[in-house]
Image: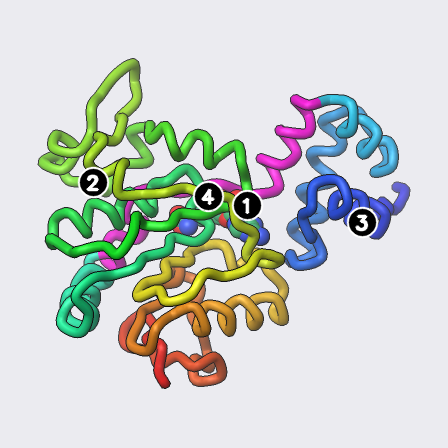
């Protein structure tokens, strides 16, 4: 078996697609690149790059495949319920209105879950919930706001009936929830971070990054939060030394920005 030239390919992806693959854990990413390369019929990464530069469909398929978009509403429902409680006990008591960011939001299930929490708890927003992802294709889908049954399995029957319309096999989110969210492309590795958030939800994406990159992301997120603001991470994304970044753990996977 020939060794694939990942150094060449990473540089090629950076200069053509502006994605820094060096930030991601190597083993899993390289296995995925190898798999998708083979599906295209290419046997080397040089050949694969040539194919990607002329074939828009394969380019889109490559970008979709490496950015793993699995998601659902209220992912880890018990953690989300607790997060809702923390918003009420830790934030709504201290701040009149909130600025919220769902980072790496995939097809929108996460920011729309937050919008439902905002609506139900009568939370005043400073601006629409910012929902960002690196992947433009999924952001397009997120804006449309349609979901499969399995993606909304954690939504109660009452909420399904209240906030969704069912058509042609899909559940479409209604406008009063949709209008609370603004989608934008943003790269957590290379992008500039907005400031003054009260809530950052960043779940199930840092697991893909190398440790030094993860460190930098948490430092930038702490800097982006107001003192007392909350970071909510994924169910496998414990921050082991939160004080290193300026956080204090207040519940499972919930960290408060401290002075
Ligand atoms: C597994 S999904 C997580 C979705 C959602 N946060 C959740 O927990 O259900 C990971 C998302 O991270 C996005 N992503 C990957 N690399 C990124 C980067 N460098 N910057 C921003 N988003 C990125 C992917 O496009 C994908 O939508």
Between disc 1 and disc 3, whose residue precedes?
Answer: 3
Image quarter hosting the N terminus: top right
Q: Quadrant of residue 233?
A: bottom left
Q: Quadrant of residue 148?
A: top left
Q: Is residue 39 above or below residue 168?
A: below
Badge 3: how crowded within 10 Å, few (<14), some, or many (20+)?
Answer: some
> Residue tagged by mark 3?
11
Which color mode does the image show? Answer: rainbow
> Residue tagged by mark 1?
134
Residue 61 within the segment the image draws in magenta: yes
Q: Nearer the viewer, mark 4 or mark 3?
A: 4
Q: Which is nearer the eye, 100 or 24?
A: 100
Check disc 1 and report its element: helix, strand or loop: loop
The residue sitting at 38% across, 53% down in the picture is: 102
- Residue 43 picture location, percent across and down: 85, 32
Name the side, left or right, on which 19 lies relative to 78.
Answer: right
Check disc 3 and report its element: helix, strand or loop: helix
Cα–Cα gap, marks 4 and 1: 9 Å
Cα–Cα gap, marks 3 and 2: 42 Å
Residue 133 within the segment the image draws in magenta: no
Q: Is residue 195 above or below residue 101?
A: below
Between disc 4 and disc 1, whose residue precedes?
Answer: 1
Image quarter hosting the C terminus: bottom left
Q: Quadrant of residue 236?
A: bottom left
**Label 2 near ligand 1 (CB < 8 Å):** no
> Residue tagged by mark 4?
184
């Amino acid at each position: 078996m020939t060794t694939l030239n990942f150094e060449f390919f990473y540089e090629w992806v950076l200069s053509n697609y502006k994605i820094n693959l060096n930030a991601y854990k190597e083993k899993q990413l390289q296995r995925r690149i190898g798999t998708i390369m083979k599906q295209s019929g290419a046997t080397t990464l040089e050949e694969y790059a040539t194919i990607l530069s002329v074939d828009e469909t394969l380019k889109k398929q490559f970008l979709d495949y490496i950015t793993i978009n699995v998601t659902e509403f209220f992912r880890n429902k018990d953690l989300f319920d607790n997060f809702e409680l923390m918003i009420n006990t830790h934030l709504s008591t201290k701040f009149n209105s909130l600025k919220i960011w769902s980072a790496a939001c995939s097809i929108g299930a996460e920011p729309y879950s937050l919008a439902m929490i905002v609506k139900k708890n009568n939370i005043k927003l400073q601006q629409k919930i910012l929902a960002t992802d690196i992947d433009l294709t999924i952001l397009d889908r997120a804006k449309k706001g349609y979901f499969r049954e399995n993606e909304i399995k954690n939504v109660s029957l009452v909420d399904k009936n209240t906030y969704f319309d069912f058509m042609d096999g899909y559940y479409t989110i209604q406008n009063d929830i949709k209008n609370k969210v603004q989608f934008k492309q943003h790269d957590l590795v290379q992008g500039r971070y907005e400031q003054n958030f009260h809530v950052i939800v960043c779940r199930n994406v840092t697991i893909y990054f190398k440790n030094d990159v993860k460190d930098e992301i948490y430092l930038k997120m702490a800097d982006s939060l107001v003192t007392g603001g909350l970071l909510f991470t994924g169910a496998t994304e414990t921050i082991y030394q939160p004080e290193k970044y300026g956080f204090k753990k207040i519940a499972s996977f919930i960290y408060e920005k401290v002075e």
